[in-house]
Image (cartoon, rainbow, N blue to C red):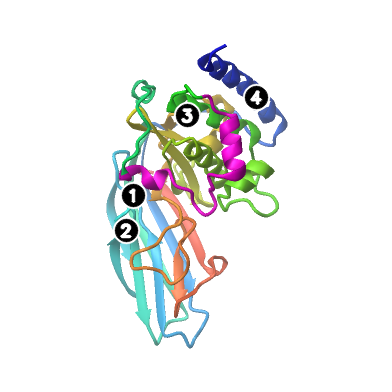
Amino acid sequence: MNARQLYTSFVAIILVLGLSAGARAESPAKSSAPPDRLRSFTFSYHADIPVSNPAAKKFEAWIPLPREDAFQQVRDLKIETPVHFEIVDQDSNGNRVAHLEASAPLPASVPITMTFATTRREEAADMVAAARDFPEPTDGRFAAYLEPNRLVPLTGRIAQVSANLAETDMTPLQQARVDYEYVTSIMKYDKSGTGWGRGDALYACDVRRGNCTDFHSLFIGLARARGIPARFTIGFPIGAAKSGEVPGYHCWAEFYSGGVWVPVDASEAWKHPDRHDYYFGHLDAARVAFTMGRDLVLKPPQNGEPLNYLIYPYAELDGAIVPQKEIKTKFSYSDAGA
C-alpha cells in the first residue's frame, strides 16, 4: 500500500472515529439550514474601560477594527469616545486598531462605541488549485505562518503527533485534511473548567477539549510542523436571527496549498457534523473578521508583552495592563433591513 492509499485509508478511519466521538460528546447538532452565503448587517462594539487608579497620569487603549478584504467590505465606520483617538494601520496582515490616549486628569472610565455596516461573503477556496503539489514556499512572505507562537510550539509533542499523521508523498492539501480529521475527531467543544480559550496547542493536544481557539491552535501547530503555512483569524459569530447580541468571539484558520489559502473551521465542524466536509475549504458568511495573527506587537507599541490575540480592548494605565475581566463589553448585530 503506497502513501496515497494509506492517506485514503487513514481519512476513512478518522471519519469513523470522528462520527463516534460526535455521538458521545455533548451538544453537536444537525444544522437546520444551509450555511449563509451572504450576510449584510450592522455591527456594534461597545466597551467601558475603567480607570481604576485615580492617580494615573496616562491612559492608552487599542481597539481592534474590522478587516477589509475580498470577503468582507466595511462601510460607515463610526467611533465615539470622549478621548482622543487615531486609526492606526498595524502594517501586518491587514490589521487596524483605534488607538485611544488621554492624560490626567482622567475620567473614572473611558467608554467607546464602534458601529459599522458590512457585507460578508462566503469564503470558498479553489480546491482544484489547492490540490496542486507545489513546492513548499520558502520566501519571507510566509515566515510568520511557518514559525511557532508562544502557545503553538512546533517541537516536542506537536512535532511528534504531526509526524505520526504524516506520509512523505502527501500533498499539503492531503496532509492538512488528515490534520483536520484528527483535530475534529479527538477534540470536544467544551468550555468547562480552566485552561481552555488560550489557544494553547499543547493543552488541546493533551486535554482534547476547548473552544475554537484551542481547536485551531492545534490544527495550525500540526500544519506548520509539516512545513505548511497556516494562519489564525479572530472575529465574532453572527446568529441565525435577524438581530441579537453576540456573547463572545469566534476564530478560524487557513492553510496554504497549491498557491491558494484554504479556510478551515474545525470547531464549527464539530458543532455541526453535517457540515464537516463543508468547513474544510469554506467559511460561511455568518461571521465578521477583525484581527489576524498571534503574539501581536501593536502600533504604537504596548508596554506589556506581545498579545496572544486581539479581539477585546487592550488598555494600559501608566504602562500597567488593565485586567480584561474589569472591562465591560457588549456586542450586537442587526441584518440590513431588519
The local crowd at label 2, few if under 14, some if 14 to 19, many if 20 or more residues have their Cα within 10 Å, is some
- Mark 4, secondary structure of its residue: helix
Q: Which residue is mark 2?
A: 90
Q: CA distance from mark 1 to mark 4?
A: 36 Å
Residue 312 % position (x, y): 47, 59
* Position in image of residue 248 (x %, y %): 52, 52
Q: Residue furthest right?
A: 24
Instruction: Say which amino acid is labelled 1.
Output: Asn
Q: Which segment did they paint magenta? A: 140-167
Cα–Cα gap, marks 2 and 4: 42 Å
Q: Report which residue position mark 1 lands on.
A: 93
Which badge, 1 or 3, is on the more N-terminal residue? Answer: 1
Nearer the observer, disc 1 or disc 4?
A: 1
Identify the element where label 2 is drawn: loop
Position of 206 compared to 43: left or right?
A: right
Kindly indicate the quadrant of the structure image that contains residue 212: top right
Q: Which residue is mark 3?
A: 280
Which numbered dot is residue 19? Answer: 4
